[in-house]
């Protein structure tokens, strides 16, 4: 298996995290890992994101990566902060080439056949399907995956605990991304751990 596939198979849900305050990073990471979700995607949507990635890496068992990476400069900053994988909302040739050359596990966003073909040209076979719920949902993903038998997906966007099982039951889906596991505001470790346990109990096999 490719390194990105190993990461995708670690747990059925990858929490998509928007960290506003670096002080929240450790409690969130501790609670998620304790609940069975070891793969943590910290989106580069806030000034605290890179520092949060570095902090979360100190939690034993955590596999911490950067999301919302949109260009080579952000890619470099994320890698320098200690990111172990990279997720992007889309795929450009510049970002794709830079990610492939860096050697870091990379999960680029796709929503069309052209996106996937661009990724295949770069040697990529694992993609985020984003935004999942507004890009046609599961029927669209199944139709999109049909011509690309070698491709695997992590659908993200609009997925929750109730809808995740249907996505995970689809053959091309290895895991889903979700923000529901960590409610907004000051982290409640017990509540996050409970939500993480519910998510980690879903099947991704």
Image (cartoon, rainbow, N blue to C red):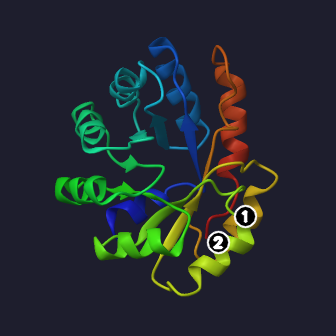
Please tell me which residue lies in front, 53 or 102.
102
Vertical side of 195 occupied by 127: above or below: below
Q: In the picture, which quadrant includes the N terminus? A: bottom left
The CA span between labels 1 and 2 is 6 Å
Give the residue at mark 1: 137
Please tell me which residue lies in front, 201 or 146.
146
Question: Residue drawn 47% across and 40% down?
Answer: 41
Please tell me which residue lies in front, 193 or 113.
113
Q: Are marks 1 and 2 in contact (CB under 8 Å)?
A: yes
Indicate left or right for 122 with 8 as reference.
Answer: left
Residue 96 is marked as none
Vertical side of 13 occupied by 41: above or below: above
- Is residue 91 shown to the viewer in this render? yes
Q: Position of residue 68 (x, y in %)?
A: 45, 41
Q: Quadrant of residue 166?
A: bottom right
Please tell me which residue lies in front, 5 or 36.
5
Q: Secondary structure at mark 1?
A: helix
Indicate left or right for 27 with 168 as reference.
Answer: left
Question: Residue drawn 57% across and 41% down?
Answer: 15
Question: Residue drawn 72% across and 26% down?
Answer: 191
Q: In the picture, which quadrant includes the C terminus? A: bottom right
Q: Quadrant of residue 73?
A: top left
Residue 141 is marked as 2
Q: Position of residue 13 (x, y in %)?
A: 60, 51
Q: Secondary structure at mark 2?
A: helix
């Amino acid at each position: 298996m490719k390194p990105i596939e190993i990461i995708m198979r670690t747990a059925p849900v990858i929490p998509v995290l928007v960290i506003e305050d670096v002080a929240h990073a450790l409690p969130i990471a501790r609670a998620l890992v304790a609940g069975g979700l070891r793969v943590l995607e910290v989106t580069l949507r806030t000034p605290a994101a890179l520092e949060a990635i570095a902090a979360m890496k100190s939690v034993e068992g955590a596999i911490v990566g950067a999301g919302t990476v949109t260009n080579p400069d952000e890619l470099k900053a994320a890698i320098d902060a200690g990111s172990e994988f990279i997720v992007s909302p889309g795929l450009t040739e510049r970002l794709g080439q830079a990610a492939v050359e860096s050697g870091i596990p990379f999960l680029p966003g796709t929503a069309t056949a052209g996106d996937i073909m661009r990724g295949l040209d770069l040697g990529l076979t694992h993609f985020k399907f984003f935004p999942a719920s507004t890009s046609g949902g599961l029927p669209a993903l199944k139709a999109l995956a049909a011509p690309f038998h070698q491709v695997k997906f992590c659908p993200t966007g609009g997925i929750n605990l109730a809808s995740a099982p249907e996505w995970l039951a689809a053959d091309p889906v290895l895991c889903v991304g979700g923000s529901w596991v960590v409610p907004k505001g000051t982290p409640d470790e017990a509540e996050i751990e409970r939500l993480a346990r519910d998510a980690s109990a879903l099947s991704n096999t």
